[in-house]
Image: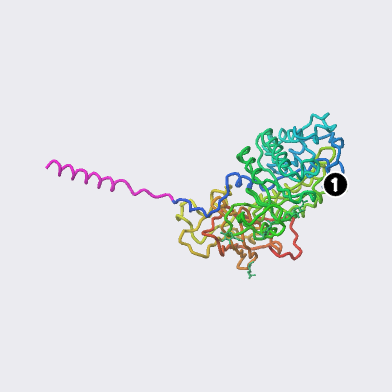
Amino acid sequence: MAKIWCSLWIIAFFQLCTCTFPKLEQVPTPPLPILPLPTYAQLKWQQREIIMFLHFGVNTFTDSEWGTGHESPGIFNPVGLDANQWARTASDAGISLMILTAKHHDGFCLWPSKYTDHSVTNSPWRNGHGDVVHELVDAANPRGIDVGLYLSPWDRHDRRYGHEIAYNQYYLAQLQELLSRYGGVREIWFDGNKGKNAPNMSYYFTDWFSMVKELQSSINIFSDAGPDVRWVGNEQGFAGSTCWSTINRTSLSIGNASIEDYLNKGDPKGTDWLPAECDVSIRDGWFWHKSESPKRLSKLLEIYYNSVGRNCVLLLNVPPNPTGLIADEDVQRLREFRSAIDAIFSTNLAEKCSIKVSSRRGGKGGGFGPENMLDNDHLWTYWAPRDDEKESHWIEFRSTGSDEGLRFNVIRIQEAIGLGQRIKRHEIYVDGKRVVNGTTVGHKRLHRLGGGVVHGKIVRIKIGDSRGLPLISSIGLHFDPFWHPIGQPSQ
Ligand SMILES: *[C@@H]1O[C@H](CO)[C@@H](O)[C@H](O)[C@H]1NC(C)=O
Ligand SMILES: *[C@@H]1O[C@H](CO)[C@@H](O)[C@H](O)[C@H]1NC(C)=O
Ligand SMILES: *[C@@H]1O[C@H](CO)[C@@H](O)[C@H](O)[C@H]1NC(C)=O
Ligand SMILES: *[C@@H]1O[C@H](CO)[C@@H](O)[C@H](O)[C@H]1NC(C)=O
């Protein structure tokens, strides 16, 4: 009897509980990612947007682009070298990573390497006690700027070049010096250039890359074939108007001209996350030449739209001069470049609009609403449609003012790439008229409207096709006062 009473009490107690405590509302979870995904270091790299390259060395004093390797260290004497001026210039331009040519093809080393006498040690600069790499690190790090390095595999000076084992050992020894003496190095740059005197010599990239990762855990390795950052396939600073961060690494090799188009566009079916870096110089040459001057602001902006605005990072070379300073005119141009970018993107007209979307994951208050596209987090807060929304994903901005509507000429779209790159096709309509027929988006897609300034009340973005559901982290409608199209198409 006692048993029965006891059971009844337990049943009654549980019924009481279920009645008085409401069912727990489940918080909608983020959707599953679509592989491949970026690593932490790749995401950090992508958010830098602009990186500075500094080509500096004996070529700076001989007015050449490729040194012969026979230059005397005696010519290297940048009497006014001030790495603080370089770092200040980068900082003022909003740049957070500076990559220095520690050694170019001529073989002259900007740091005192113990494996060669062809270095700053035998130059008159700082009486042979100088170290450019060290001075750069000391100037950059206190300003919150990271450092990267380029160590040319092709060496036109060292006698070991052409002797495969001996040269690979020499190269690796220098790599170890650079990656263990100077603290954190965030990017290392490799190319496959080779001398005609050693066509059959192999560079042991696999050994080199393994050693790099062993010595620097959060570094990104750049080369034609990655493994962390790929070349964009040209030196104009232009990515493809379709540009995937995904690609098949097995189809890539270093120094192979026939893959340039593949590098430029990437691969929607790619199994590796390997985003592209667009290298270009602010002047014609990579090294400083008296006869050259910096590109016009309009050219730099075109490069920005075609690199950063096409899901890539811009690696902009700014060469120090023989005094050891970045020339005033380059400093000035970089300042204009930064203030132009800030002016264009500081105002987002979409913030003044009402927004409608095709659907939202988890419903209203579910955490994936369109307001996430207008906050300051361009990575981890995003609009997501419902899982069962099969096609016809769209977002609509409607001007709320009673005036003449919106006046803009740039549209910015950003995907939540932390969960994979997804969008394959998108179209944009203003008051029912199509102004963009586009493909990929990725981290950041910028459309400068070819028809010029648009006046309208309703902007509708249609995602035509994507790998899984599109996840959009940010959208902007901007006005670019520097853009004067002369009949250019909007791609
Ligand atoms: C490079 O290899 C090719 C093919 O094996 C050979 O014919 C050529 O003589 C080699 N060149 C040199 C410089 O060793
Ligand atoms: C260059 O790339 C093409 C296309 O992927 C490939 O067929 C070829 O074997 C590659 N050449 C070398 C030397 O790797
Ligand atoms: C890349 O790899 C994927 C998966 O193996 C394959 O489907 C795709 O066709 C490859 N892309 C190219 C261009 O070979
Ligand atoms: C839009 O672009 C795609 C691919 O670039 C193309 O196939 C299609 O014909 C274009 N549509 C129109 C109407 O121009």
> In which quadrant is the C terminus drawn?
bottom right
Q: Is residue 443 above or below residue 452?
A: above
Percent across and percent down for residue 263 are 67, 57
The answer to whether residue 5 is magenta is: yes
Examine the image and state in which quarter residue 83 appears: top right
**Residue underneath mark 1:** 64
Looking at the rendered structure, the kind of residue marked 1 is Ser
Q: Residue at x 59, y 61 (%)?
A: 424
Percent across and percent down for residue 209 are 64, 44
Q: Is residue 98 visible?
A: no
Q: Is residue 199 above or below residue 75?
A: below
Residue 456 vs residue 364: left or right?
right
> In which quadrant is the N terminus drawn?
top left
Out of 144 and 236, give the one closest to the viewer.
Answer: 236
Examine the image and state in which quarter residue 472 appears: bottom right
Q: Is residue 354 above or below residue 89?
A: below
Q: Residue at x 82, y 47 (%)?
A: 66
Q: Which region shows up in magenta?
A: 1-27
